[in-house]
């Protein structure tokens, strides 16, 4: 297994957040370590509902498992 330089990865991820002009935070947990990246890390202390951000994870899972295509559109009828 190749060694990964986590400090370089951390710096690269943080650099992406530094480029945007929005209050943002991204938290990862690998089962052992919690890492926080972003421009407004205090937001990580407050729980928020995932709302539409959850759709991103579902879309990636669908694409990686060939259950959806990059051109597929899922229409919502506005009903809950």
Image (spheres, rainbow, N blue to C red):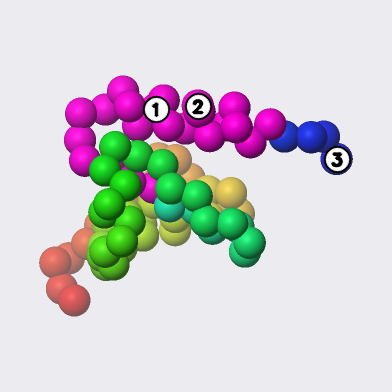
Q: Is residue 73 left or right of residue 58?
A: left
Mark 2–mark 3 distance (CA, rounded to whole Å): 22 Å
Query: Badge 3: how crowded within 10 Å, few (<14), some, or many (20+)?
Result: few
| Residue 73 appears in view | yes
Q: Contact, CB < 8 Å: mark 2 with mark 1?
A: yes
| Residue under numbered circle 2 | 12
Q: Which residues are magenta?
A: 5-26
| Residue under numbered circle 3 | 1
Mark 2–mark 1 distance (CA, rounded to whole Å): 6 Å
Q: Looking at the rendered structure, which numbered label has been put on residue 16?
A: 1
Q: Residue at x 59, y 57 (%)?
A: 33
Q: Residue at x 39, y 47 (%)?
A: 26
Quarter of the image for residue 20 reads top left
Q: Residue at x 33, y 56 (%)?
A: 44
Q: Identify the main secondary structure in magenta.
A: helix
Residue 40 placement (x, y as % from top left): 26, 43
Along the line of sight, which residue is nearer the eye, 63 or 2? 2
**Given the current orientation, which residue lies at the most extreme left position?**
78
């Amino acid at each position: 297994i190749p060694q990964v330089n986590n400090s370089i990865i951390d710096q690269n991820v943080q650099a992406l957040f530094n480029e945007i002009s929005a209050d943002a935070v991204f938290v990862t947990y690998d089962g052992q370590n919690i890492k926080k990246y972003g421009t407004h890390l205090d937001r990580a202390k407050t729980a928020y509902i995932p709302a539409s951000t959850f759709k991103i994870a579902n879309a990636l899972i669908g694409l990686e498992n060939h259950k959806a295509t990059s051109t597929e559109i899922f229409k919502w009828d506005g009903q809950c």
